[in-house]
Amino acid sequence: MNNLGKAVLVLDLQNDFIGINAKFPVARHQVPSMISNVNHIIRKKNEEKWHIIYIGNEFKKSQLISNWFRDNAALKGSAGAMIHEDVNVVNDLYFSKTSGDAFHNKKLVEYVNEHKINEVIIVGVFAEGCVFATAKGAKKQGIKVTVIKDAIAAANDSLKDKAVEKLESLGISIQNSICL
């Protein structure tokens, strides 16, 4: 591994959100370029010895009301909760979550603290949901945050644009993958 204090957080690139038969999909036209850019970032930052951290939703079957709204997407143990096969997986560093902000997972926070991670790049889905919440959560932890605009997706283009604007207004850095 490494001790650079830098990590890429790969959020929710799961079958039920980006797969062809996704139960709760992002805008389909955003997926191919997003995956290509995410894989480029993973490759580059892995070579630079950054921590590559995969994070996925794993909702409990007992969350009946919220599961109904999500069409039972990403249920713990389901095929839909698995990382999509087109995503470059370079290690087994994976943390589950049941809420938007990945930093609600105490094990992730412990890992970040143990490895003195003070800078993160965030990629994945949903820009208006988990990407936004996790970026805010990381900033609250005192971590420098960059969201990669062409490596995130949302339910539609308007929601993606609004999420990016809100993140910028919070002082979170927004970049394109070509700038890395």
Image: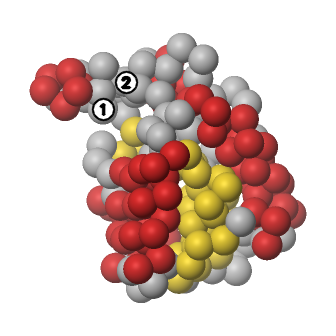
Given the image, on which type of amino acid does mark 1 rest?
Answer: Phe
The residue pinned by badge 2 equals 73
Pointer 2 local density, CA inside 10 Å: few below 14, some 14–19, many at least 20:
many
- Tell me if residue 72 comes above or below residue 5 in the rendering: above
Q: Is residue 25 left or right of residue 60?
A: right
Colour scheme shown: secondary structure
Task: Between label 2 and label 1, give the one nearer the viewer.
Answer: 2
Q: Which residue corresponds to the image point at 15% horizontal and 23% vertical from the top-left?
A: 64
Q: Quadrant of the N terminus?
A: bottom right
- Badge 1 marks a residue whose secondary structure is loop
Kind of residue at badge 2? Ala
Q: Is residue 100 above or below residue 61?
A: below
Q: Residue at x 73, y 31 (%)?
A: 86
- Name the quarter where the C terminus is drawn: bottom right
Q: Is residue 107 visible?
A: no
**Which comes sooner in the sequence, label 2 or label 1?**
1
Q: Quick one: 153 or 12, which is closer to the camera?
A: 153
Q: Which mark is residue 59?
A: 1
What residue is shown at x 65% (from left), y 53% (from top)?
151
Query: For residue 13, what is the image quadrant?
Result: top right
Residue 136 position within the rendered picture, expressed as x and y whole percent measured from the top left = 37, 71
